Amino acid sequence: MVKVAPAMMCADLANLEREVRELEAAHVDQLHFDVMDGHFVRNIMGPDTMAAVRGITGLPFEVHLMVTCPDDYTELCARAGADIISFHAEASTSAYRTIKLIRKVGCQPGLVINPSTPPCAVRYILEDVVTITVMTVDPGFAGQEFIPRMLDKIEEVKALIADQGLNCLIQVDGAVNKRTLAQVIRAGADILVVGASGLFRAGQAYSTTVEEIKSLARSLRL
Ligand code: DX5
Ligand code: ZN
């Protein structure tokens, strides 16, 4: 079943508790927290928003580390309540070591690849992560344009996973919305990060959007 993961940087941060409760009631599957160091991407956001809501929900928290040195943030994110810590293949010079560090702090490791990074770059590490996130926009900001050629890449990553007989899930992050949803699901996405256009500024109740996504996924997967 396709999972829905709201990108919390797009939520109404002035009413975060209300947002989390509404998302929980809308049956989202996990929350996606972007952490940015202003260097790997030209935006800055820490794990404090995640820490602020850790105590009010049992939903799994996944951190998307858009930072130049992911090893420096594993402990901080674990303490802030992360369940999964996803780091960029482009940011880690020693991904096996980063994965070990993430497991050492009690979290599960995820890997992220930017739009211009080929799937073969993760071929020898896929079996050590629980999710591989295919960015469908250049990272750092919500509300960007979807990059259509990423659909082929999602299919290539799916094939890589199948070839190796792995059960690593494919997460898609960036401009997943009404216009791109069906193609992304058909290409093989298992987890959909939905941000501004896909959820928070979709102009309808979160529960309506989440139900629309899940029923579309059901119809496409049968
Ligand atoms: C962008 C972040 C995404 C983003 C998604 O760098 O990684 O999580 O917030 O927002 P939309 O869905 O609006 O692109
Ligand atoms: Zn993200």
Image (cartoon, rainbow, N blue to C red):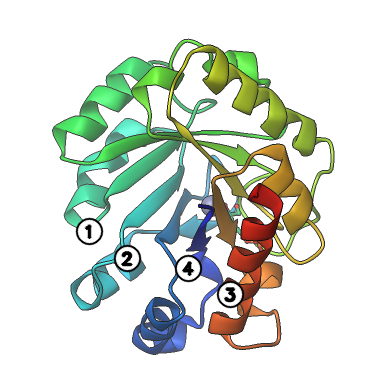
Within-10-Å neighbours for mark 1: few <14, some 14–19, many 20+ = some
How far apart marks 3 and 1 lie (CA) works out to 30 Å
> Who comes first in sequence, dot 4 or dot 3?
4
Q: Residue at x 40, y 83 (%)?
A: 25
Q: Residue at x 76, y 67 (%)?
A: 178
Q: Position of residue 101 (x, y in %)?
A: 22, 28
Residue receiving disc 4: 8
Element at badge 1? loop
Is residue 42 visible in the rendered image? The answer is yes
**Disc 4 marks which amino acid?**
Met
Residue receiving disc 3: 211
Q: Are marks 3 and 1 in contact (CB under 8 Å)?
A: no
Q: Position of residue 95 (x, y in %)?
A: 39, 19
Q: Are marks 4 and 2 in contact (CB under 8 Å)?
A: yes
**Disc 1 marks which amino acid?**
Ala
Q: Which mark is residue 25?
A: none
> Who comes first in sequence, dot 2 or dot 3?
2
Within-10-Å neighbours for mark 2: few <14, some 14–19, many 20+ = many
Compared with 161, 189 (above or below) is below
Residue receiving disc 2: 50
Within-10-Å neighbours for mark 3: few <14, some 14–19, many 20+ = some
Q: Quadrant of ligand 1?
A: bottom right
**Disc 3 marks which amino acid?**
Glu
> Who comes first in sequence, dot 4 or dot 1?
4
Q: Position of residue 47 (x, y in %)?
A: 33, 59
